């Protein structure tokens, strides 16, 4: 293993460790908060769903990539490759669905109190769980092709679409490949488009709210932001991060697939950046949600009190 491979191996290891730690902290927070808050907000339920998807991504794809970066090869057979890559693709679909739903739900939550929006807001809590189930069904169906064209490591004589060193994606037919690409591209386009529209609407509402509050409290101290406003800012930040990273992923992947020679540095950098959202998003949520810091501080004080 040369210096470049060692460096990427360390980066993968740190990224996986930080990402898993952040997502597990959030999962434990939502699990512990659920009994004390029977009616979790749509934002909390959407975030919990996103955290679960991020955790599956890091476990199913991040760990094998980290092992491969450290020089491990042939540690998965064909069945193992199908299962792990299917879980990764399904979780990636869940992540984009969850971020989109989260953006839409939060946009509805902070919308003006008109009669039309009031009716939608009243129905919103009942729509969260069915929407999550629908996203699972969509993810399981759309990414079913992985169970067919994913296999273990293959030699160079086989026509490959993608070589992950420890797993390979074989080409079935040009027509099937084109159909899969079109379906996945349309799915991503629809969800990213809805996410962007919802985020843009929230930015507009937040800006108008900020102007109104600044005008009202021009000669006094403004009160702190409401939980809805803080949640909206958090969701906008998450959606913006996802859209930017998704654009980077699509452009970089297209460049790599159209290159005859795949530079090691470019391919490995693409893999490292592919986990950025799953690693950074829980840290962003922990930093922006003061309830999480208060919860873990209270748990730490309770633990210290019980030991003393």
Image (cartoon, grey):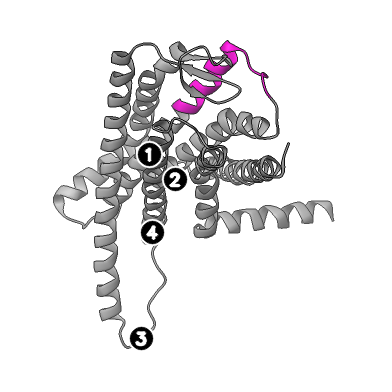
User: Could you tell me residue 55's position as x and y percent?
Assistant: 55, 36
Q: Earlier in the sequence, mark 4 or mark 2?
A: 2
Q: Tell me the element at label 2.
A: helix
Q: Earlier in the sequence, mark 4 or mark 3?
A: 3
Which numbered disc, 2 or 1, marks the residue closer to the eye?
1
Instruction: Classify 273 as above or below 294.
Output: above
Which of the two discs, 2 and 1, labels the residue nearer the N terminus?
2
Q: Which residue is mark 4?
A: 233
The residue most toward the front is 260
Q: CA distance from mark 4 to mark 2?
A: 14 Å
Q: Residue at x 66, y 58 (%)?
A: 297
Q: Secondary structure at mark 3?
A: loop
Q: Which residue is mark 2?
A: 44
- Residue 250 has which mark? 1
Q: Residue at x 53, y 56 (%)?
A: 291
Which image quadrant: the N terminus? Answer: top right
Residue highlighted by disc 3: 220
Q: Earlier in the sequence, mark 1 or mark 3?
A: 3
Q: Nearer the viewer, residue 46 or 300?
A: 46
54 falls in the magenta region: no
User: Do the CB atoms of the residues marked 1 and 3 lie less than 8 Å apart?
Assistant: no
Task: Classify mark 4: helix, strand or loop.
Answer: helix
């Amino acid at each position: 293993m040369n210096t470049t491979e060692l460096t990427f191996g360390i980066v993968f290891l740190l990224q996986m460790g930080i990402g898993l730690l952040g997502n597990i902290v959030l999962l434990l927070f939502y699990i512990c908060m659920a009994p004390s808050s029977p009616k979790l907000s749509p934002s909390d339920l959407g975030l919990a769903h996103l955290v679960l998807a991020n955790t599956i991504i890091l476990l199913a794809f991040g760990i094998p990539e980290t092992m491969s970066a450290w020089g491990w090869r042939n540690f998965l057979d064909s069945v193992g490759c199908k299962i792990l890559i299917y879980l990764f693709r399904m979780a990636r679909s869940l992540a984009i669905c969850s971020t989109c739903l989260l953006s839409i739900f939060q946009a509805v939550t902070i919308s003006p109190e008109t009669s039309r929006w009031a009716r939608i807001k009243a129905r919103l809590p009942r729509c969260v769980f069915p929407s999550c189930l629908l996203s699972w069904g969509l993810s399981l169906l759309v990414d079913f092709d992985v169970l067919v064209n994913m296999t273990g490591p293959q030699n160079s004589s086989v026509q490959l679409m993608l070589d992950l060193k420890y797993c390979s994606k074989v080409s079935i037919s040009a027509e099937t490949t084109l159909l899969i690409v079109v379906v996945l591209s349309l799915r991503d386009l629809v969800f990213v488009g809805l996410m962007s529209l919802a985020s843009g609407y929230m930015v507009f509402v937040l800006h108008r709210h900020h102007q109104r509050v600044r005008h009202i409290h021009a000669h006094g101290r403004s009160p702190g932001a409401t939980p809805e406003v803080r949640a909206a800012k958090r969701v906008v930040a998450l959606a913006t991060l996802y859209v930017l990273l998704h654009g980077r992923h699509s452009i970089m992947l297209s460049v790599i697939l159209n290159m005859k020679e795949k530079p090691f540095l470019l391919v490995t950098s693409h893999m490292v950046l592919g986990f950025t959202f799953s690693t950074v998003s829980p840290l962003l949520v922990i930093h922006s949600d003061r309830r999480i810091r208060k919860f873990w501080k209270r748990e730490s004080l309770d633990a210290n009190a019980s030991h003393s």
